[in-house]
């Protein structure tokens, strides 16, 4: 598992959105962030990758830098899923990831 300081900051920020606060309890988000910090945390990313949504370019950079097998996203609007892959990293939904990896 690979994450980055940018992603951890994004999770903290997004968890404060009013529409997400009804489903994401602050304590559980804190536990998730703490658990993610046990992964490989990339401190410095060079984000010079083009993405349909510039705010998602760091995810593509993180996938390449971490040599990830999968980038898992449920955001169908951002264009990541439509892209399909970057380098060796496949971009998939949580359902596809669970089907291929967890139930294999």
Image (cartoon, rainbow, N blue to C red):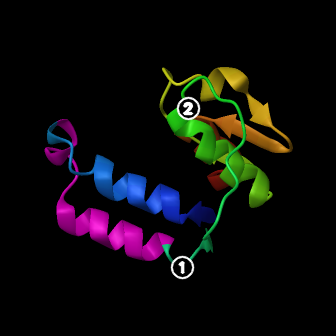
What is the magenta range?
19-36
Q: Which of marks 2 and 1 is nearer the N terminus?
A: 1
In the displayed structure, 15 sits above or below 32; it is: above
Question: Which quadrant holds the N terminus?
Answer: bottom right
- Name the one closer to the observer, 37 or 44: 44
Local SS, label 1: loop
Q: Which is more foreground, mark 2 or mark 1?
A: 2
Name the residue: 32% across, 58% down: 12
Left or right of 18: which side holds 35? right
Residue 39 placement (x, y as % from top left): 59, 73
> Toward which corner of the image does residue 86 lie, by quadrant?
top right
Q: In this view, does 62 lie to the left or right of 93?
A: right
Query: Residue farthest to the bottom?
Result: 38
Q: How far apart are marks 2 and 1 (CA)?
A: 27 Å
In the displayed structure, does residue 2 sit left or right of residue 31?
A: right
**In magenta stretch: residue 39:** no
The label on residue 29 is none
Residue contact at pointers 2 and 1, CB within 8 angstroms:
no
Q: Nearer the viewer, residue 35 or 5?
A: 5
Residue most extreme to the right = 88
Is residue 104 among the parts visible in the rendering? no
Badge 2, how many Cα within 10 Å: few under 14, some, many 20+? few
Residue 2: percent from the left, percent from the top? 64, 64
Residue 25 in view = yes
Circle 1 residues within 10 Å: few <14, some 14–19, many ≥20: few
The residue lying at 60 percent from left, 71 percent from top is: 41
The location of residue 87, given as percent across then percent down, is 85, 41
Give the overall secondary structure of the magenta segment.
helix
Task: Look at 39% across and 68% down and name the residue there.
Answer: 33
Residue 40 sits in which quadrant? bottom right
- Residue under pointer 1: 38
Q: Residue 54 carries which label?
A: 2
């Amino acid at each position: 598992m690979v994450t980055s300081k940018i992603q951890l900051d994004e999770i903290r920020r997004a968890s404060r959105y009013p529409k997400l606060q009804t489903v994401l309890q602050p304590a559980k988000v804190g536990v998730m962030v703490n658990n993610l910090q046990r992964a490989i945390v990339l401190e410095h990313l060079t984000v010079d990758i083009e993405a349909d949504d510039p705010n998602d370019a760091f995810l593509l950079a993180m996938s390449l830098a971490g040599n990830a097998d999968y980038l898992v996203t449920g955001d169908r609007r951002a264009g990541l899923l439509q892209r399909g892959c970057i380098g060796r990293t496949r971009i998939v939904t949580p359902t596809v990831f669970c089907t291929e990896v967890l139930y294999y």
